[in-house]
Amino acid sequence: MDHYDIVIIGGGLAGLTAAKTLEEHNINYILLEKNSTIGGKQRTDTLDGFQCDHGFQVLSTAYPEAKKTLDLDTLRLKPFSRDAYCYNGSGFTRIAHPFENIITNITAIHRKLLTPKDLFIFSKLAFSLLKKSTSEILESTEKSTLDYWKTLGFSSSCIYYFLSPFFKGIFLDNTLTTSSRLWLYYFKQFLIGKACIPEQGIQAIPEQIASHCSPNSIKTGHEVLSIEKNTLHIKNADSIKSKLIICATSNPAASTLFHFKKIPYQSVSCFYFETSEPLIKHKGLHLDGSKGLINNFHSVTHVNPIASPKNKYLLSFSAIPEYPERIIHENEIKKDAQRYFGNQTETWNFVNKYLIKEAVPVQQHVYSSIRTNLNTDHILMSGD
């Protein structure tokens, strides 16, 4: 039986970051990942020359841990433009970053998507958040995100056509009962940073972290079946003994190993289509707050040109199911997209789709520090 100072269960971002830290401190460890590849939810497929991430995912250049852990320059980040195109049932209206392009936002007022009061609230809130630390934000008065927007006084059109689809795409929460603390945190990140895609896809992030670890310290295809005190029993492999166990899995996987209650998760479906013409010619995100299936979409090719073959274009659509068991099919997305593109959707080629059932945990309560009674002298919980 092999012995280690620390065993990490899970090869996603949390587990790999723990491994990188232990490597830097010359601590004897091993990371066990049940799948054949590392990365967890951060995965990228290349299909017929098209680069498809497992779900629409971005990296903000403002994330504190990203700046601390990653070499952002080496990732060759491809930024989205800092604006959004909001669909109101008849067409799209552009909304710009609160500190940029005031003319664009005045146009949004004329089109009745925003009000002067909305712009005032955005500006006042932005200046306030820039003065606050992350801890202060995560210790602020908490209510649901939707109730918080209403308390601030945002107009119904701003909430319905801009704020709701934008942050539903992050929280994957159709009811917007996610903690207002989390909304404030993300709002600040978008104020001071840029949303980007690594040139080689989202999987480049875990691969970069893993490159700092000894290859012999990361074992894929090693599923932990059970834990008995400090002994881990591995599927089709010898058991391992460890002084400390870091559990960096999703909550459902951890609950099976440690026998505690599962928390609910939000799900999302992501669809990729190939077009022969550049139907979108900018790097902005399109939002749809109407009652269609599609929540947001963008041109992957215009954000990251190497994500598709020459003279071909890749569109990404995200849809949040009304309930977890709802299966959305690609033909439903093509039909829904006719509201924007008309019959051009009939010429699109389907590339791939991803249903991520456990995308992010439901987060109605968020704190500035970890609150759990699961940590012991030999078990440390991490990840979701």
Image: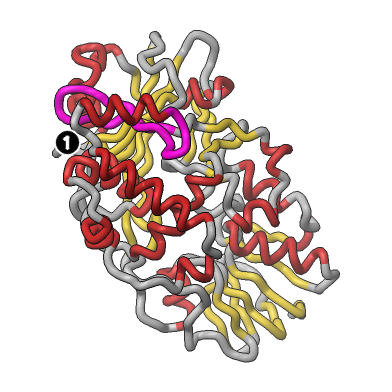
**Relative vertical location of residue 285 with respect to residue 154 in this rendering, above or below:** above
Residue 94: say if magenta.
yes
Q: Residue 29 sits in which quadrant?
A: bottom right
In the rendered image, the residue lying farthest to the right is: 26
Q: Is residue 349 left or right of residue 248?
A: left
**Relative vertical location of residue 340 with respect to residue 6 in this rendering, above or below:** above
Q: Is residue 163 left or right of residue 276?
A: left
The residue lying at 69 percent from left, 55 percent from top is: 69
**Relative vertical location of residue 3 with respect to residue 205 in this rendering, above or below:** below
- In the image, residue 183 lies at what x, y percent? 38, 57
- In the image, residue 93 lies at what x, y percent? 27, 26
The kind of residue on which mark 1 rests is: Gly
The residue lying at 80 percent from left, 57 percent from top is: 214
The residue lying at 29 percent from left, 45 percent from top is: 163
Q: Residue 219 sits in which quadrant?
A: bottom right
Q: Residue 157 sits in which quadrant?
A: top left
Q: Nearer the viewer, residue 40 or 242?
A: 40
Q: Which residue is mark 1?
A: 292
- In the image, residue 288 lies at what x, y percent? 24, 35
Q: Which residues are magenta?
A: 83-101
Q: Is residue 362 visible?
A: no
Q: Nearer the viewer, residue 330 or 300?
A: 300
Q: Is residue 45 visible?
A: yes
Q: Is residue 232 left or right of residue 125?
A: right
- In the image, residue 331 lies at what x, y percent? 22, 28
Residue 273: say if magenta.
no
Task: Judge the density around disc 1: few (<14), some (14-19), many (≥20) Cα neighbours within 10 Å.
Answer: few
Question: What coloring was used for the rendering?
Answer: secondary structure
Q: Nearer the viewer, residue 107 or 148?
A: 107
